Image (spheres, rainbow, N blue to C red):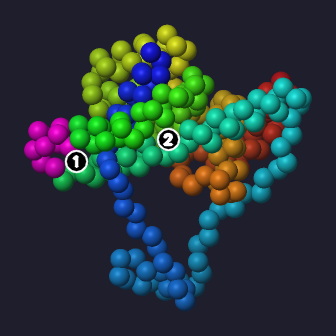
Amino acid sequence: MFRYSLVFVFLLIFGLGFSQESAKDSVADYYVRFEGDSILYSSIALDEVFIFGKLEFADRKEKLRYYILRRKTLKVYPYAKLAAERLVELNDSLTKIKKKRHRKKYTKEVQKYIEGEFSDKLKKLTRTEGQILIKLIYRQTGKTAFNLVKELRNGWRAFWYNTTAKAFKISIKEEFHPEKIHEDYLIEDILQRAFAAKKLERQESVLDYDYAQLSNKWKNNSPDKN
């Protein structure tokens, strides 16, 4: 039942659109072209670069915990990224569909398509992978899975699926707070290292926090030191 509940939650999120077009900037001779217009710049903005410290662990148990968390995070992050993209696409698409019945029909067609594509994969997630995915959904969208279900369907369905998930020790109301929760910081650290190593495609979080500041905070206030 847990897996089917999780599938329902994310099918609602993933089933928000078929594709998303993204415009890429092109740079040539210090000119940046935006939809036909060229703007002269004296310099080119570069992506922020982090210098990562060497991973250090208090003991073998802590090291094992980190690497298990890394494996699970790398596995589920692409789903969270996709969810954020689908939400953006849904908002764009629905603004172009005026009639309510057409909007409803569009949503159902997309959900059916996405169900065929992702259902089997989501059913294979473990409880801990599902909980990490819930957190990453919040990282990428700023909304809990509970609120997304509530917005896309209704409050009763959100309550029902949250209650079912609780029975299997997973909450779809879970948020992501790397500034407060050490495991959330570890997840963020895993993501940033994976982005830098090109193991994952970067998608910025909608949340307001600074990874460098988080690293300094947790370095000086590690749970192992308390």
User: Mark 1: which secondary structure?
Assistant: helix
Residue labelled with disc 1: 94
Asked whether residue 96 is drawn in magenta, I would say: no
**Three-letter residue code for mark 2:** Ala
User: Mark 2: which secondary structure?
Assistant: helix
Check if mark 1's residue and mark 2's residue have beta carbons within 8 Å.
Answer: no
Distance from disc 1 to disc 2, alpha carbons, whole Å, reads 21 Å
**Three-letter residue code for mark 1:** Leu
Residue located at (29% from left, 32% from top): 152
Image coords of residue 190 (percent x, y): 69, 43
Residue span colored magenta: 97-106
- Extreme residue toward the top, this view: 167
Image coords of residue 59 (percent x, y): 89, 29
Residue located at (43% from left, 80% from top): 33
In depth, the one of 110 and 21 nearer the eye is 110
Q: Residues within 10 Å of mark 1 (few under 14, many from 20)?
A: some
Q: Quadrant of residue 8?
A: top left
